[in-house]
Amino acid sequence: MIDRRTMLAQTAAGLAGLYGSSRLLAAEASRDFPPVRTITQGPKHHWFGYYDKWQFDPTDRYVLSNQVDFEHRSPRAGDTIQVGMVNTEQGDHWIELGKSQAWGWQQGCMLQWIPGTLHEVLWNDREADRYVARRKNVITGEQSTLPHPIYTISPDGKFGLSLDFARLQRMRPGYGYVGLDDRHPEQLAPADEGIFKVDLSTGESTLLVSLADVAKIPFQGSTLDDRWHYFNHLLVSPDSQRFIFLHRWRARHPETGQPHGGFTTRMFTANIDGSDLYVLDPSGNTSHFIWRDPQHVCMWTHPTGRRAGYYVFEDKTSNISQVGEGLLTQNGHNTYLPGTNNEWMLSDTYPDGNRNQKPFLFHIPTSRLVPLGEFYLPPEYRGESRCDTHPRYSRDGRTICIDSPHTGSGRQLHLIDVSEIIG
């Protein structure tokens, strides 16, 4: 355990390291960073992608990863990546599991362990004129194909949620997949496109929420008729009873009529059958988020009349409260460490003026902020092909995995030992 004097020093150093209030304290913080171990090597590049999926198997021995032989450009239709896992108890040995032609730099191919299973993983791929999902037992090698790509899996492991990744790529390159075209290239909000529930045993799918239905709901008193609509960032609640999605839209170009300019966002929640739709964050500014529990969502946003920051929203109510007010002042990719009663929040920052990315832990009851390191992001990692750290935790919450190219070998996986921090 860490005594109070050390805790206060780490908090001060953490603030300085994250927000640059003192060079001296930032230097002090660097001596307190927890140990880091790199588990993948060049010449090929390795990364996992997003922060809200299981990367570690139930034993915390195997760590999933994507593998690719190039960087610094957008994927092309013929680009294939390998998917595999690292055996961290046997010399960080790479074990190939399969391949994918449905991937992006930010979220990979949605590679993840299937909740409720010991040895099964899932990832997205492309077959001829459709995106699909591969389901594989990493021990027996048994593999099956689902006729739909999966965005996120329910915590009970029974179903996944899906959307049109081609439309998503068109609306926000880097988050969807190349290789197929938007099925509705001229429709602003198609009625037969939206969020689908996919049975992971049978592959059967059901449309839950359509773009057309959501586009009809006014935004702050104004209609959204003349906008291009799409969905992004789906996540099922811990009890598998409700789900989140971000409804986003872009303007039409005055001359070409195509999607134009930036996007606006609002967060919805809904029952698993698509009913009881609720606008949880109507601000237009929702960014990264995570379910804290079945009734609450923690997100980075800028609520009307408040400062931007991390806020906890109570589902289906207007109740909100800020996390780390005055301390957590930068957007990042946030989760809660398992086994800590939601007292420890894990997140990161985007590159600072020195292009350092800074994952950190924040102890909510004591406002203790603990930096986990400073990871340099070379200037060539920008835009769609940037490499965010996207911190992900092990099943026991004592190890953090990040993506980072700071070692000079391209993007690789790195493990951070936080066991002494959380005690």
Image (spheres, rainbow, N blue to C red):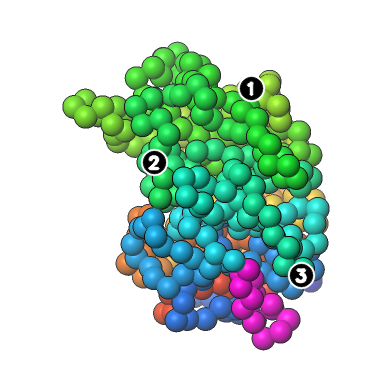
Can you give x and y, in whole percent of width and height, for residue 360 in the image?
Answer: 59, 61
Which mark sits nearer the N-terminus, 3 or 2? Answer: 3
- Residue 1 sits in quarter: bottom right
Please name the residue that numbered disc 2 is placed on.
181
Which numbered mark, 1 or 3, is in the foreground of this view?
3
The residue positioned farthest toward the front in the image shown: 128
Q: Main secondary structure of the magenta part?
A: strand
- Which residue is disc 1 drawn over? 277
The CA span between labels 3 and 2 is 36 Å
Image marks 1 and 3: residues in contact by CB distance under 8 Å: no
Q: Amino acid at mark 2?
A: Asp
- Quadrant of res 237: top right
SS of the residue under disc 2: loop
Q: Residue 156, percent across and down?
A: 79, 45
Instruction: Please give the range of residues in magenta.
Output: 84-97
Question: Which callout, 1 or 3, points at the residue further toward the start of the chain?
Answer: 3
- Distance from disc 1 to disc 3, alpha carbons, whole Å, reads 40 Å
Amino acid type, mark 1: Leu
Q: Residue at x 63, y 68 (%)?
A: 97
Q: Residue at x 52, y 47 (%)?
A: 131
Task: Report the amino acid beneath label 3.
Answer: Ile
Question: Which residue is drawn at the image coordinates 69% and 60% (left, top)?
Answer: 143
Chain-order first, disc 1 or disc 2: 2
Q: Is 16 in front, or is 129? A: 129
Q: Is residue 55 visible?
A: yes
Circle on res. 139: 3
C-alpha separation, residue under disc 1 versus residue under disc 2: 29 Å
